[in-house]
Amino acid sequence: MTAVPSHSLRLFDVFYRAGSLVFGGGHVVLPLLQAAVVPPGWVSNDAFLAGYGATQAVPGPLFTFSAYLGTVMGPSPNGWLGAALCLTAMFLPAFLLVIGPLPFWDDLRRHPSAQAALRGVNAAVVGLLLAALYRPVWTTGITNAGDFALGIAAFLLLFMWKTPPWLVVVFCAIGGEAVARFSFPA
């Protein structure tokens, strides 16, 4: 899309493509979004990861994250207009998918080839989710023993003790500040 001089169209293109690839969870497109918005300088890597972490406390984090990115991006459009543009572009593929094949969905899902394709896509999503967890989340978020301990504590709070996600985010923000102040050795 570099042949198109409009930043608005480039922005729409990035988020539309990301929205087209959301399957089994928005986290699968996290590396795609990071590669699209951080290297050109639209958003710093720190702002990207901070926004990603904060949006985990709300329903539909990827869609909330797209609005956040549209708001904080450096080049115009940003703010409310950028948020609306990115959010619309992220939702549009799913909306088109729902209204397009919906009348044929019952017939389509009965075909063995369609069932096999969906099983294959679901299996691939697991690998993509692990890749998204590792890079950028693990490689930039877990830099020392304190970060690792905080990550384990967050995991246990979520999965063992069923703590509400918003509370885990608050705990991790406070814990992250403590880890930064005491700078545990790696």
Image: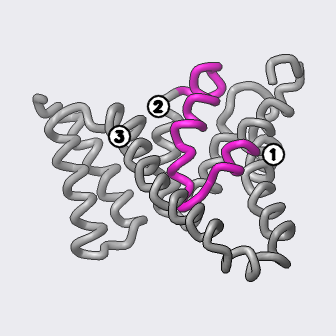
Residue at label 3?
A: 134
Checking the image for residue 46, the label placed there is 2
| Quadrant containing the N terminus in the rendered view | top right
- Label 3 vs 1, first from the N-terminus: 1
The CA span between labels 2 and 3 is 16 Å
Q: Nearer the viewer, residue 1 or 42?
A: 1
> Residue at the spot x=30%, y=75% of the render?
162
- For this rendering, which residue is in front, 171 or 103? 103
- Between the C-alphas of marks 2 and 1, the distance is 22 Å
Q: Are marks 2 and 3 in contact (CB under 8 Å)?
A: no
Q: Report the span colored magenta.
A: 16-44
Q: Amino acid at mark 1?
A: Leu
- The residue where tag 1 is placed is 85
- Label 3 crowding class (10 Å Cα cut-off): few <14, some 14-19, many 20+? some
Q: Are marks 3 and 1 in contact (CB under 8 Å)?
A: no
Residue 60, percent from left and from top: 59, 63
Q: Which of these two is toward me, 68 or 119?
A: 119
Please give left or right for residue 173 compared with residue 90 in the image.
Answer: left
Q: Is residue 149 above or below residue 181?
A: below
Is residue 35 visible to the viewer in this orientation of the structure? yes
